[in-house]
Image (spheres, grey):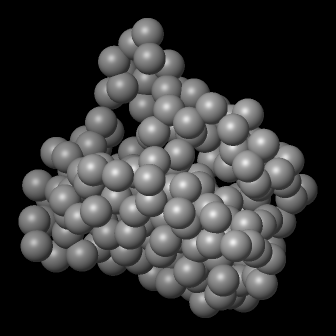
Amino acid sequence: MDVLESAIVFATDAHSGQVRKISFTPYILHPLEVAGIIATMTNDIETMASGVLHDTVEDCGVDPKEIKTRFGARVAALVQSETEDKLYNRPPAETWKERKADSLLMLKYTKDLDVKILWLADKLSNLRSFYREYLKRGDELWQFFNQKDPAMQRWYYQTVADYVPELEGTAAYIEFNELIKKVFG
């Protein structure tokens, strides 16, 4: 089994029983979609594997050392680039902007194109989900999130777009910007 196949098996097990908060679909479909989006921008298997694994540390409690041991330092570093400090000592709604601003700083200053590819793929998958649910629910959609203000959500997603200009010519980047307009007006 190569690193991507191993990552799929590992992430499927790690996310077992989890569902997406707005669509209630099996969670594993999101990281698989992220890997598929990555595949439109690069043929690097380690970057695709990181897409499959990107939420295992943050949302499943997987130890980052286990990612490094199983999948190597490169995959572990990519996963870490998408792992947010949840600041568990305070309520998530209270820390939302602080957490997002901190993680965006890493994206802003990275020179690693694969980090930018991973971020764009993850956020594009999120926006696709937002758009589908927005068509069904309208502004009620935002009640499912820690940050209920769509203007703040727009700030976050627009900032991601601003921090990955190297990807402007990709179909993923173009779709991402179109969905920002469709979801946030």
Q: Position of residue 165 (x, y in %)?
A: 75, 70
Q: Answer with left or right where residue 46 lies relative to residue 6.
A: right
The answer to whether residue 115 shows anywhere in this view is yes
Q: Answer with left or right where residue 47 lies relative to residue 160.
A: right
In-front residue for pair 47/176 = 47
Above or below: residue 132 compared with residue 65:
below
Q: Which residue is outermost to the front?
A: 1
User: Which quadrant of the figure contains the C terminus?
Assistant: bottom left
In-front residue for pair 131/55 = 55
Q: Answer with left or right where residue 63 lies relative to residue 20.
A: right
Above or below: residue 30 compared with residue 108:
below
Going 39% across and 45% down the picture, which residue do you hit? Answer: 152
Q: Please identify the quarter of the rendering in which residue 52 is found.
A: bottom right
Q: Position of residue 122 (x, y in %)?
A: 54, 63
User: Which quadrant of the figure contains the N terminus?
Assistant: bottom right
Going 80% across and 77% down the picture, which residue do you hit? Answer: 44
Above or below: residue 134 compared with residue 157:
below
Q: Which residue is outermost to the right?
A: 111
Q: Please identify the quarter of the rendering in which residue 111 is found.
A: bottom right
Question: How many labels sit on residues?
Answer: 0
The answer to whether residue 101 shows anywhere in this view is no
Going 51% across and 56% down the picture, which residue do you hit? Answer: 11
Q: Position of residue 124 (x, y in %)?
A: 49, 70
Above or below: residue 39 compared with residue 97:
below
Going 38% across and 69% down the picture, which residue do you hit? Answer: 29
